[in-house]
């Protein structure tokens, strides 16, 4: 494989590992009482940090940012949907052209797999980054951040920069 094909594939496990290591650190910190509050619908424990970001452990039984909360069979339906989306994006990544597109897809895929590991392992996702002081209402994690950044980059690549790509395309001829 050429380096242009390998680096996007390397971002996926790097994102997944960063997500899982950060969640392991939260789960292993006694101040969060993560396993004690597994069935609670509110924040488990919190650590205040200097600045606008705090750490607040919550169990998210939905998708990114708490959408589509579910337990039981819904857990497995969400896991299946997440897996299908991640595999669809992986297929797209394998044929994608352009660095920004490849980066955006790799971030989304790595984040999706990070949250999928939690969903299968616990039936819920570990969320802990609280930016409420910045008027951001959701508690999220590294995987959610990767998915969000990847989605913004994907939007930029597909909609904001697509006109420039077409304008610079050498296979287009101008009629005079």
Image (cartoon, helix red, strand yellow):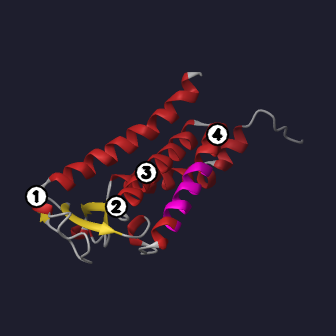
Where disc 4 sits, the SS reads loop
Residue 118 position within the rendered picture, expressed as x and y whole percent measured from the top left: 37, 56
Whether 38 is drawn above or below 161: the answer is below
Q: Which residue is mark 2?
A: 122
Q: Secondary structure at mark 2?
A: helix
State yes or no: discs 2 and 3 in contact (Cβ < 8 Å).
no
For the image, the number of numbered tags is: 4
Few, some or many residues within 10 Å of mark 2 (<14, 14–19, 20+) = some
In this view, 22 is above or below 67: above
Q: Is residue 107 left or right of residue 132?
A: right
- Res. 165 image quadrant: top right
Label 3 crowd (10 A; few <14 / some 14-19 / many >=20)? many
Instruction: Confirm whether residue 7 shows in the render.
Output: yes
Q: Which mark is residue 111?
A: 3
Question: Which residue is farthest bottom?
Answer: 41
The answer to whether the residue labelled 1 contacts the one labelled 2, judged by CB atoms less than 8 Å apart, is no
User: Which x, y percent locates residue 100?
Assistant: 54, 41
SS under mark 3: helix
Depth check: give the residue in front, 50 or 173. Answer: 50
| In magenta segment, residue 81 | yes
How far across and down, in percent of the image, does residue 84 sit?
59, 56
- Segment colored magenta: 77-88
Q: CA–CA distance between discs 4 and 3? A: 18 Å
Q: Position of residue 122 (x, y in %)?
A: 34, 61
Mark toward the start of the polypeptide (2 vs 3): 3
Q: Residue tagged by mark 4?
A: 96
Q: Is residue 97 visible?
A: no
């Amino acid at each position: 494989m050429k380096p242009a094909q390998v680096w996007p594939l390397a971002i996926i496990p790097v994102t997944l590992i960063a997500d899982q290591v950060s969640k392991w650190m939260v789960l292993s910190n006694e101040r969060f009482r993560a396993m004690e509050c597994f069935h609670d619908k509110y924040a488990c424990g919190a650590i205040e940090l200097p600045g606008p970001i705090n750490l607040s452990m919550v169990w998210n039984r939905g998708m990114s940012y708490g959408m589509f909360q579910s337990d039981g069979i819904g857990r497995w339906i969400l896991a299946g949907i997440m897996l299908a989306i991640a595999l669809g994006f992986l297929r797209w990544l394998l044929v994608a052209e352009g660095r920004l597109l490849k980066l955006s897809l790799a971030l989304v895929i790595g984040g999706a797999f990070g949250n999928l590991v939690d969903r299968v392992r616990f039936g819920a996702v570990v969320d802990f980054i609280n930016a409420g002081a910045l008027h951001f209402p959701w508690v999220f994690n590294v995987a959610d951040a990767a998915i969000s950044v990847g989605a913004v980059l994907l939007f930029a690549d597909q909609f904001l920069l697509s006109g420039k790509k077409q304008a610079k395309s050498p296979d287009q001829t101008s009629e005079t």
